[in-house]
Image (cartoon, grey):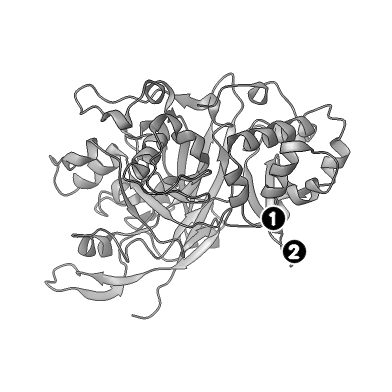
């Protein structure tokens, strides 16, 4: 568990004015990582850190005399075209660089001019995936989401018994993971048209999003050696936003008995920014299990996880239709909730993932599973909000959605905020559905 230190001081200020902008995502207490370059240039992608409305170019900074020791070693690793080598250095190196950057960016820094020369406006930057993703695992860990989906058809239904005993997951496809701004074609696949008795190969008719968090693995583990729950967070570098797009009609037909295939492998979108667990330390919350529910088996239960294994990360989903963009209207807010409602913690996901001997590697990506809360308007997927398409959601000016249409852009946003702590933002995760190819 990460302890609070001077980098979490709510009164700390940067010499960069935009870092103090009200409602901003990237104050000096955050310092998230991405891989970027100046838009429209042939420059190599390299690691950067967000501060206010700028990106601190770690390649440029590493070429100055502003850093030394472990912090310089970490910055050089993070300055590469993917963050994998930086992830592999581990928590001590991550912390050394965070502390060094905090000192350089803090108001009164003697090296402010040197650092200022290494800044690139975010408005002029483009991003790529922050790491070479070797493997991607998508979990299914929101009890509210699971119950909402099942009770669309069966109002008294409950989740399968194993849901309350272990974090469920499946292994996903890496090749179609893209960074925010991703555009993808509506997938084709087998589904059963309404009223038909046999399937047809056709474009997805029930296109959906899934609001998730992406958990980025830092240090891995050797094959056959599991990661204990109390050590799990030392293997997690940070968290970003993730949209695991879903073709619901294809999924219903194909998923028995082995789970989704075409329904999930066509696109997954991640935000460019990874917020470190250290930056999120002020927003830890107690993780609890209802007394009437099964309590976790010992390998998934520790006092530390119960005391502070959850995170109060606020999440919102917005939809910007093609018509709204054409008419100059803004996006419509669909839902909002918090990650603290998740039935299983991120540490439990990592511990369970490796419990059978599976090895994780730096840059591996874990999806949290759809994040839904217990109240109205807290659903993390359109299938829940629109009750399986039966109760379309209003977008304004007469538009509504039961499922996504071509041209729809889904925007996910995340942040942490409370009195006595700096607002920590995760940026946004944006993706657009394009028309399908001919069947």
Residue beneath label 1, please? 46
**Outermost residue toward the top?**
420
Residue beneath label 2, please? 43
| Quarter the C terminus occupies | bottom left
Q: Secondary structure at mark 2?
A: loop
Residue 72: in sight, yes or no? yes
Left or right: 115 as drawn, with respect to 155: right
The Cα–Cα distance between marks 2 and 1, rounded to whole angstroms, is 9 Å
- Residue 265 at x, y percent in the picture: 38, 63
**Outermost residue toward the bottom?**
438
Q: Dot 2, how many residues are within 10 Å of its Cα: few (below 14), some (14-19), or many (20+)?
A: few
- Residue 29 at x, y percent in the picture: 65, 30
Residue depicted at 50% across the width and 65% down the height: 183
On screen, residue 372 above or below 325 = above
Q: Nearer the viewer, residue 326 or 66?
A: 66
- Residue 286 at x, y percent in the picture: 40, 22
On screen, residue 141 above or below 409 = above
């Amino acid at each position: 568990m990460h302890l609070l230190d001077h980098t979490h001081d709510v009164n700390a200020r940067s010499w960069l004015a935009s870092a103090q902008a009200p409602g901003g995502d990237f104050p000096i207490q955050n310092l998230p990582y991405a891989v970027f370059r100046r838009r429209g240039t042939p420059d190599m992608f390299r690691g950067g850190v967000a501060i206010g409305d700028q990106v601190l170019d770690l390649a440029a900074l590493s070429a100055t005399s502003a850093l030394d020791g472990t912090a310089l070693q970490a910055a050089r690793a993070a300055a590469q075209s993917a963050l994998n080598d930086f992830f592999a250095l581990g928590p001590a190196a991550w912390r050394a660089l965070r502390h060094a950057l905090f000192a350089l960016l803090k108001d009164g820094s003697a090296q402010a001019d040197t650092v200022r020369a290494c800044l690139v406006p975010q408005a002029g930057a483009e991003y790529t995936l922050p790491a070479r993703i070797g493997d991607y695992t998508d979990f299914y860990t929101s009890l509210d989401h699971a119950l909402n989906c099942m009770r669309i058809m069966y109002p008294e239904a409950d989740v399968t018994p194993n849901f309350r005993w272990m974090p469920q997951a499946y292994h996903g496809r890496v090749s179609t993971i893209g960074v925010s701004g991703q555009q993808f074609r509506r997938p084709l696949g087998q589904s059963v048209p309404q009223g038909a008795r046999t399937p047809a190969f056709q474009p997805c008719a029930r296109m959906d999003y899934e609001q998730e968090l992406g958990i980025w693995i830092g240090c891995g583990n050797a094959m056959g050696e599991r990661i204990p729950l109390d050590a799990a967070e030392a293997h997690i570098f940070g968290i970003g936003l993730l949209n695991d797009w879903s073709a619901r009609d294809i999924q219903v037909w194909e998923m028995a008995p082995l789970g989704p295939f075409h329904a999930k492998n066509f696109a997954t979108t991640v935000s460019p920014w990874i917020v470190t667990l250290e930056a999120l330390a002020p927003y830890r919350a107690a993780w609890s299990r209802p007394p009437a529910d099964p309590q976790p088996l010992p390998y998934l239960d520790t006092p530390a996880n119960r005391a502070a294994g959850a995170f109060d990360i606020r999440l919102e989903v917005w939809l910007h239709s093609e018509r709204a963009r054409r008419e100059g209207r803004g996006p419509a807010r669909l839902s909002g909730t918090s990650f603290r409602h998740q039935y299983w913690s991120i540490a439990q996901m990592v511990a369970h993932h490796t419990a059978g001997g599976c090895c994780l590697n730096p840059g591996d990506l874990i999806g949290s599973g759809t994040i839904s809360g217990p109240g109205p308007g807290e659903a993390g997927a359109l299938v829940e909000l629109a009750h399986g398409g039966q109760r379309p959601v209003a977008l304004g000016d007469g538009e509504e959605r039961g499922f996504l249409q071509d041209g729809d852009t889904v925007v996910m946003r995340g942040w942490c905020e409370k009195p006595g702590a700096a607002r920590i933002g995760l940026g946004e995760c944006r993706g657009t559905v394009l028309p399908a190819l001919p069947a």
